[in-house]
Image (cartoon, rainbow, N blue to C red):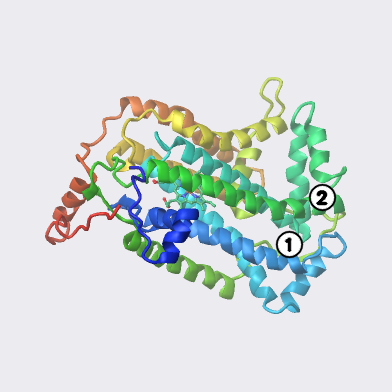
Amino acid sequence: MSEGHSTYSPKTGLGRWFDARMPLPRLVYDSFVAYPVPRNLNYMWTFGGILSIMLVSQIITGIVLAMHYVSDTSLAFGSVEKIMRDVNSGWLLRYMHSNGASFFFIAVYLHIFRGLYYGSYKAPRELLWVLGCIIYLLMMATGFMGYVLPWGQMSFWGATVITGFFTAIPLVGDWIQQLLLGGFAVDNPTLNRFFALHYLLPFMIAGVVVLHVWALHVTGQNNPTGIEVKSKTDTVAFTPYATIKDAFAMVVFLLVFAYFIFYMPNYLGHPDNYTVADPLKTPAHIVPEWYFLPFYAILRAVTFNIGPIDSKLGGVLAMFGAIAMLFILPWLDTSKVRSAVYRPWYKLFFWLFAANAIFLGWLGSKPAEGWYIPAMQISTLFYFAFFLVVLPVLGLIETPRRLPNSITEAVLEKNKAGSGHPAGAAAAPETKG
Ligand code: HEM
């Protein structure tokens, strides 16, 4: 499903004049009005739009916060308190931004798991997927640096622990750590460069999102059946069908977001970050933000040396390896069928993988001691086995369920099997595209 030829025809003289010189309205019309989308998309396809809204919200609230924030170790903590107490609506801006980061990650995890379930990473959407992985990496870097800015205890010690892991890299490790810190410890130069980069990276994310959506408009969207669009009856026009559905999902998502902002604004944060950073007082238990916890568990799962690789380097390699798995995923899965709907064994392993990811997250919040250590190791092993063993092997041995001939057929079958409503063939509007 590609964009096809444009059906845009400007109605006014000014519109025609503009179109002949810079066809921006045409681009918007072709991409967001007439653009054909599969008619069977479910609510899991609304998170791309939700992510776009969250990115805009983070950028706007972030810019206003930056007008009041001071990136100096002796003033940063106080400037955030001033924002909370003295700046007009400063508390709202800050809670929108800090909870916004969490909700951005909630949306991105649902978006990624949707892709995993329906096989959206498979050809021809590999590049679209890899661009998504780059966005995810940039989001993690942005989140990590943003958390350092309020200069609380967790900001300081989290940054110390995480940048410390770079020293495990042979030869260049110390140099990378000093480059990140701007010295030998987390201090004023660190805070300044993290602030500069935290301001820059969201704009880079926005740039990669443009490429992501461009790639999406070349291949067209996948859908719950994983079957490509074959005829016009398989699609509906983006507006009004997808726009209304996206708008409804956004409102529901924003209501939950608002509930957190107004009723439990510190629920997802750590109380230690309301204590100013003290390099002489190590908190009893250093934990990163919740969205890093699965990777934090993987990092600490390697407690033994592997030949010449010591445990610290092993942990760092495992953590980066876990992210690398996502990048090479399109080439690991050998199945010809995309969607888990028609792959009974894959469906089972997908849910095991999702449960394991949540368990890893929970383990990440625990100290590396007692039975947590073997649990982290087994979960890490399953994480890698899913990508390196299950996906390549399952595609070769699994017998998928019978695929419908088309998206339309799948929709009609579902309708027939449903509540006895007449099959929706006649009711299904054709795309304008
Ligand atoms: C700022 C972050 C992101 C934004 C704004 C964004 C935006 C979008 C939008 C608007 C869509 C189309 C609507 C939809 O399918 O929900 C989409 C589709 C897609 N995105 Fe993202 N995305 C982001 C991050 C990611 C990440 C991190 C990944 C994967 C690692 C990813 C992978 C995909 C894939 C595979 C599709 C096609 C899905 C399909 O058609 O089945 N995206 N994205």
Determine which quarter of the picture holds residue 95.
bottom right
Q: Is mark 2 within 8 Å of ligand 1?
A: no
Q: Earlier in the sequence, mark 1 or mark 2?
A: 2
Q: Nearer the viewer, residue 137 or 299?
A: 137
Spatial CA span between label 1 and label 2: 20 Å
Q: Residues within 10 Å of mark 2 (few under 14, many from 20)?
A: many
The number of discs equals 2
Residue at x 21% of width, y 47% of height: 410
Label 2 SS: helix
Visible residue check, residue 389: yes
Residue at x 32% of width, y 51% of height: 36
Q: Nearer the viewer, residue 34 or 42?
A: 34
**Residue 51 versus residue 345 in the image, above or below:** below
Residue that badge 2 annotates = 190
Residue that badge 1 annotates = 272
Label 1 SS: helix
Give the residue type at disc 2: Thr
Q: Residues within 10 Å of mark 1 (few under 14, many from 20)?
A: some
Residue 246 coordinates in the image, percent (x, y):
40, 62
Going by the image, does 414 lie left or right of 77?
Answer: left
Residue 76 coordinates in the image, percent (x, y):
81, 63
Q: Given the current orientation, which residue lies at the most extreme top position?
A: 307
**Residue 368 versus residue 290 in the image, above or below:** above
